[in-house]
């Protein structure tokens, strides 16, 4: 899940549409989000949450987000 198979080698992380990233905000703080392509997450630094991206779909539910402890 979250990867795209290619005929040229191993699966690469799925890319999320940049236009979508420009309009998404944290549902709690309304701040902009940072895209972590390696972990397939959208990071809200002020809320200290990482929202997962599954099958190129951001899951913007605080209950589904991972708490950030390393900020």
Image (cartoon, rainbow, N blue to C red):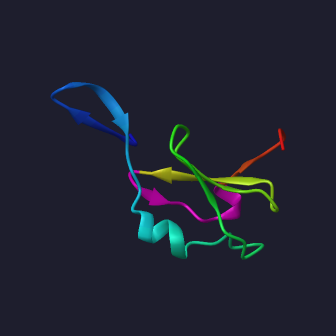
Q: Residue furthest left?
A: 7
In the depicted view, which residue is nearer to us: 51 or 46?
46
Q: Residue at x 56, y 72 (%)?
A: 24
Q: Residue 25 location in percent, x, y? A: 63, 72
Q: Work out which quarter of the rendered image holds the N terminus and state it.
A: top left
Closer to us: 6 or 58: 6
Compared across the picture, whether 6 is left or right of 57 comes to left
Q: Which residues are magenta?
A: 55-64
Question: Residue 21's spot in the image, x, y percent?
Answer: 51, 66
Q: Nearer the viewer, residue 55 or 10?
A: 10
Compared to 54, does 70 lie above or below? above
Q: Position of residue 2 (x, y in %)?
A: 40, 43
| Viewer-proximal residue among 19 and 69 | 19
Q: Is residue 53 left or right of residue 42?
A: left
- Quarter in which the C terminus is drawn: top right
Determine if the magenta segment contains residue 65: no
Residue 69, image quadrant: top right
Place residue 8 in its image quadrant: top left
């Amino acid at each position: 899940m979250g990867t795209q198979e290619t005929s040229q080698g191993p699966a690469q992380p799925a890319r999320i549409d940049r236009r979508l990233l420009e309009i998404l905000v944290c549902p709690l703080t309304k701040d902009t989000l940072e895209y972590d392509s390696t972990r397939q997450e959208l990071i809200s630094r002020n809320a200290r949450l990482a929202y997962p991206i599954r099958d190129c779909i951001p899951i913007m539910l605080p209950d589904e987000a991972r708490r950030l402890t390393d900020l």
